[in-house]
Amino acid sequence: MLYMLLCYNDEEVTSAWSDEEDAAVMKRLQVVHEKWADQYELAARLMPTITATTLHKKENLVTDGPYAETKEQLLGFYLVEVEDQQQALDFARDLTEANPGGAYELRPVKSFHPGTTTDTDNATA
């Protein structure tokens, strides 16, 4: 089953980390990455929300910044291939121990491939 683990945290907190603090978090995350290397397909760390642009679908309006004004911003994600939701939760718990604060949102993923007219249902609801 394919799951997306979305990483949220307070950007004011994470942006205030010193280079040493950030490196320490990344070192702890590397341990988790190595543990789960066979299960995750992609991980990405997003640039700060000040670099974001949002297209508001209903109004066809483009604005600077993140879509939602919330305390916690989307900082990155993992695309993981796991047996079930419980294993995805186990992965997220390991990430939480390495990178404190915020939250991990887990969502099953349907993938779409160029040249096909159907999606691939990788997870059941």
Image (cartoon, helix red, strand yellow):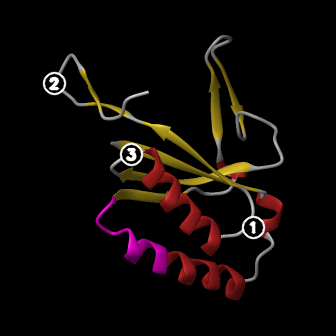
Percent position of residue 65, x then y? 72, 41
| Quadrant the N terminus occupies | top left
- Most foreground residue, 73 or 37: 37
Q: Residue furthest left?
A: 115
Residue 80 placement, left or right of 44: left
Percent position of residue 6, x then y? 56, 48
In whole angstroms, how far apart are the C-alphas of marks 2 and 3?
28 Å
Please give the label number shown on residue 124.
none
Q: Which residue is the site of mark 2? A: 115
Q: Which stretch did the figure color magenta? A: 31-39
Element on which disc 1 rests = helix
Percent position of residue 63, x then y? 71, 30
Verify CB contact (< 8 Å) between mark 2 and mark 3: no
Residue type pointed to by label 1: Thr
In whole angstroms, how far apart are the C-alphas of marks 1 and 2?
40 Å
Please give the label number shown on residue 14.
1
Camera-near label (2 vs 3) is 3
Question: Measuring 69% from the left and 84% from the top, which residue is drawn there?
Answer: 19
- Most foreground residue, 16 or 122: 122
For marks 1 and 2 on the same chain, the one whose residue lies earlier in the sequence:
1
Q: Which residue is the site of mark 3? A: 84
Residue 11 placement, left or right of 95: right
Element on which disc 3 rests = loop
Verify CB contact (< 8 Å) between mark 1 and mark 2: no
Residue type pointed to by label 2: Gly
- Would residue 78 be seen by someone viewing this image from the given angle? no
